[in-house]
Image: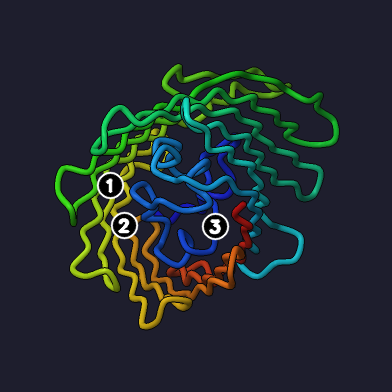
Amino acid sequence: MHSVLLFSANDYYHAGGRAFALSNASVTLIDDFAAQNNPAALAFINQSSVSASYKNIFLLSSIGIKHASVHLSRNFGSLALTYQQIDFAGYYDAKSGVAYARKFSDKFSAALQFDLLMVRPDLDEKLHYNFTAEISLLAHPSPNLWLAFHLYNPFAVSYQTLYYTEDVPVVTRLGFRYAFTSQLFVVAEGEGHSVYGMNVKAGFEYRPVEVLSVQVGVGSNPVQVSFGTGVQLHRFHINMGMVHIERAGRSAGFSIAYAF
């Protein structure tokens, strides 16, 4: 049975055009959207940044996912503020988070994020509020290998609407990234979802020149293929990605970030 992941309330959504181009195999990525995709990666970033992304679901102008974040890198660790929003046809779903990440050695970091969840199922409902958390780890056991773990909503929170009880999904991700050279790496990730089951994702990124990268990815649930490209212009990072989902259609994503 085919499922559309958009319609799980207060779901976990990946951020950034680069992640989108890799079919969201993003748990090991160390980039401007680590605050949403795996906060532990923030500890390995020495620059602060602001970032924003938008995904157009199935190329419908009325359905989109917005992300924004601010990351501050400091001697005592990394701090980040994140925001996610979806709204269409009276439905409103948003998540605000604050994350703290710290490196415990040159090979290991951990992060904890607290989230405020806000959802209004339709115009007749009130706005529901819930709190949950995210836990993430990142390890660098060898020069070419990265391992990562991320858990969203460990408390399995839920809330009562006018007509039913809505469970916020529990999402567990485990993945690796291996760099063959400074220009080429592969990623693979397993994502366990309490509503939609297991999704296995993989992809690769190739950087032919310093300022340009290309990405290709695949996913199993739903079955999908993806591709995209990114450019780095001084302190600006711009990425675009497109996903084709079997029996559902295409979605496109764009992101921009500024490092300071």
Secondary structure of the residue carrying numbered label 1 = strand
Q: In the rendered structure, are the residues bearing label 3 and label 1 in contact, judged by CB atoms less than 8 Å apart?
A: no
- The residue at 63%/43% (across/down) is 69
Identify which amino acid the numbered label 1 is placed on.
Gly
**What numbered label is drawn on residue 127?**
none
Disc 3 or disc 1, which is closer to the eye? Answer: 3
Q: Earlier in the sequence, mark 2 or mark 3?
A: 3
Q: CA distance from mark 3 to mark 1?
A: 19 Å
Q: Earlier in the sequence, mark 1 or mark 2?
A: 1
- The residue at 24%/50% (across/down) is 176
Q: CA distance from mark 2 to mark 3?
A: 16 Å
The percent position of residue 130, horizontal first and vertical second, equals: 63, 19
178 horizontally vs 65: left or right: left
Identify which amino acid the numbered label 3 is placed on.
Gly
| Residue linked to disc 1 | 190
- The residue at 35%/68% (across/down) is 217
